[in-house]
Image (tube, rainbow, N blue to C red):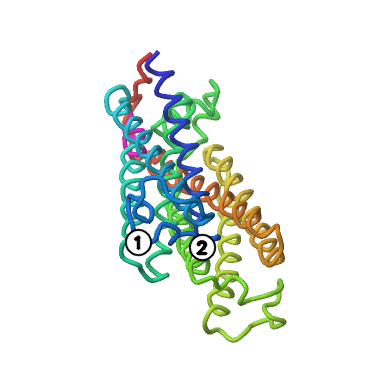
Amino acid sequence: MKGKWLRALSTASAIGMFIVLLMGALVTKTESGRGCGDDWPLCNGKFIPSYTIESMIEYSHRFVTALEGILVLAAFIGVLIFVKRKDAFWYATTALAFTVIQALMGAAAVIWPQSSAVLALHFGISLVAVASSLLLAIVLWNPEKVPQTFDEAAAAESRGSAAKLASFHGPTVGLRAAVWLTTIYSVVVVYIGAYIKHTDSGGACSGFPLCNGELIPALSGGTGAVFSHRVAAMLLVAMVILLVVMTRRTGVLPEFAKWANWSLAFVLLQGMSGVLVTFAMGTEWYLFMALLHTVWIAGLFSVLCFLSVRMIQLNPDRRQGSAYRRIAE
């Protein structure tokens, strides 16, 4: 019973964190961040603000974030008491820590107006909270399918075949480095995109694949930021494709290829939605496409984070045997 309750709680927490991320993006896109003036936690000096579009968007974001904070805290306590998995503990801890950090940064941004460069950090912090919540739910729902050691993973993949078991090897140094580098680099790409949102520079580079009709435009101001984001995103696609190739080598655990394929799907969707955002500017589809772009970013970052963790867990040099216990029933 406790296991079912905790799984449901982790799922609610992951969904709630995803909603918080989207609402934060909505606040930025609609420029509603000052919808409650410089008051926090009140809105324009009131517990229930007067109705304006900006104030309702901003205040509802605060309200949902507060509820999500309660869910994340409850999930953390549940994991601490009932789950004896190190990865679940770290996912729950990271989700709680980054939820608190993003809430404090949001409050600080209201009380003390900050630069766009600082505000752009908020989105990256929210992504870490989303990824941690999602990975916690995955681990709690499928503990047997997410073994914590190479030996367990290899045994599961071999399905009783001794020859197949002997052929498996853990992630190479090159593969581990490639995954970690790609994950870190994705944060850079995300930050540039968030900076563009906060500076409202999206329209500085019209058209695609050309930018303002030029292959390489003047690299200054908003145009330089948008063009840099495009180039960085293309490089990220290339890096993810390389991951897919590397994870398909003989002997590498098939699990890595599965998650690399997911990362490729998300990065391609992210890229296509980014192009659609460019063409949707000034139309009624712009907000929808911008939020969809956020969805694919969250998916990509979560998968890359999971791959990064699995690179550590499934390293044969960390052999620990069957060291995990299931969630208390």
Q: How far apart are marks 1 and 2 (CA)?
A: 14 Å
Residue 157 falls left or right of residue 208: left
Q: Is residue 224 above or below residue 36?
A: below
Q: Residue at x 44, y 18 (%)?
A: 4
Drawn side of residue 16 relative to residue 94, left or right? right
Q: Nearer the viewer, residue 276 or 265?
A: 276
Magenta highlight range: 85-91
Q: Which disc is residue 31 wearing?
A: 2
Earlier sequence position, callout 1 versus callout 2: 2
* Residue sitting nearer the eye, 8 or 132: 8
Residue 108, horizontal then vertical, whole percent: 31, 59
| Helix, strand or loop under label 2 | loop
100 up-or-down from 108: above or below = above
Q: Is residue 116 magenta?
A: no
- Mark 1 residue element: loop
Q: Dot 1, how many residues are within 10 Å of its Cα: few (below 14), some (14-19), or many (20+)?
A: some
- Main secondary structure of the magenta stretch: helix
**Taking 72 as reference, is 12 left or right?**
right
Q: Where is residue 257 in the image (x, y as percent from the top left)?
A: 57, 43
Instruction: Report the amino acid beneath label 1.
Output: Asp
Q: Nearer the viewer's eye, disc 1 or disc 2?
A: 1
The three-letter amino acid code for the residue at tag 2 is Glu
Which residue is the extreme one toward the left? 81
Quarter-of-image position of residue 207: bottom right
Given residues 268 and 163, the one toward you in this image is 268
Q: Residue at x 66, y 62 (%)?
A: 277
Circle number at residue 38? 1
Q: Above or below — where is 235 with respect to 214?
A: above
Quarter of the image with the C terminus in it: top left
Specify the farthest residue to the bottom.
218
* Other-residue count near label 2 (Cα within 10 Å), few / some / many at <14 / 14–19 / ≥20: some
